[in-house]
Amino acid sequence: MAKFIIEHLDVIGKWILIEYKHSYEIAKREGVDLLICGLKLEGIPSTEKRFYEIFDPKNVIILDPQANESLKTEDFNGIDAVIIGGILGDHPPRGRTKTFLSDRFPQSKKRNIGKLQFAIDGALYVAIQVMKGKKLEEIPTINGLKIISEFKGAEEEIILPFGYPLVNGKPLISEELIRYLVSNRPYRIRWGEDEYISYWQRV
């Protein structure tokens, strides 16, 4: 079974570390191996080595939103690893995966996971589902969500203009990330015409 690799390529900060932690939780739940390369983290399988120091680039798939071909289950045959760029997304996208990974390793396969720009943890989840036999069009996704928090009677909106897979009808996003963004204030999440409410209190 192929390993899933997150190649750290961004500035270290709270947001990206939360996504790495959530990615590891997803990998454990889905029964796959995850390794973060380029950064050593406590409590998460990780190494300061780069992926190309561990795997032959000819035997990996790089997930790149700009790739011409979409990821399919049969793409996993005979490969050693799937490489996900450890990059926080920009809106609009700047194509950094292509610059930092795809262009540097022309011998690697390149695949997209649809037209949306996913968060790191969401990209991992989608790729795992494809490996397990699902087609991309069978994986429900949304394009963007809004976090609405309450503070002293006023509402504050945070818009995340990225793709998110839906799991059991809810967007796959780390609750730790939401708490970080809204400072543990009560919040609700809205996407499309649907909404679910979750309240958090400081402990």
Image (cartoon, grey):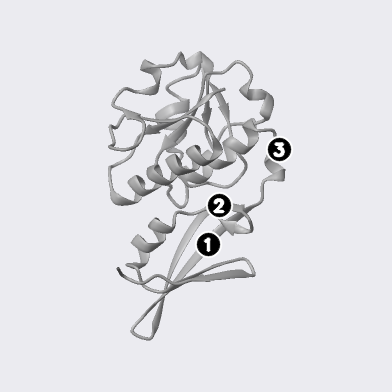
Q: Of label 1 and label 2, which has the lower sequence position? A: 1
Residue 23, how many percent across, how many down?
A: 45, 42
In the displayed structure, 129 sits above or below 33; it is below
Q: Is residue 159 visible?
A: yes
Secondary structure of the residue carrying numbered label 1: strand
User: Does 60 sit above or below residue 38?
Assistant: above
* Circles 3 and 2 in contact, beta carbons < 8 Å: no
Give the number of the disc on residue 180.
none
- Residue under numbered circle 3: 135
In the rendered view, tell whether residue 56 sits above or below residue 118.
above
Q: Using the numbered discs, state the Cα–Cα distance from disc 1 to disc 2 in whole angstroms.
A: 8 Å
Residue at image x 60%, y 52%? 167
**In the image, what residue type sits under mark 3?**
Lys
Give the mark toward the camera: 3 or 1: 3
The picture quadrant where one finds residue 44 is top left
Q: Secondary structure at mark 3?
A: loop
The residue that label 1 is drawn on is 145
Report the residue at 34% width, 51% height from top.
15
Q: Residue lying farthest bottom?
A: 153
Q: Secondary structure at mark 2?
A: strand
What residue is pinned by disc 2? 164
Q: Position of residue 82 (x, y in %)?
A: 51, 27
First in sequence: mark 3 vs mark 1: 3
Q: Are marks 1 and 2 in contact (CB under 8 Å)?
A: yes
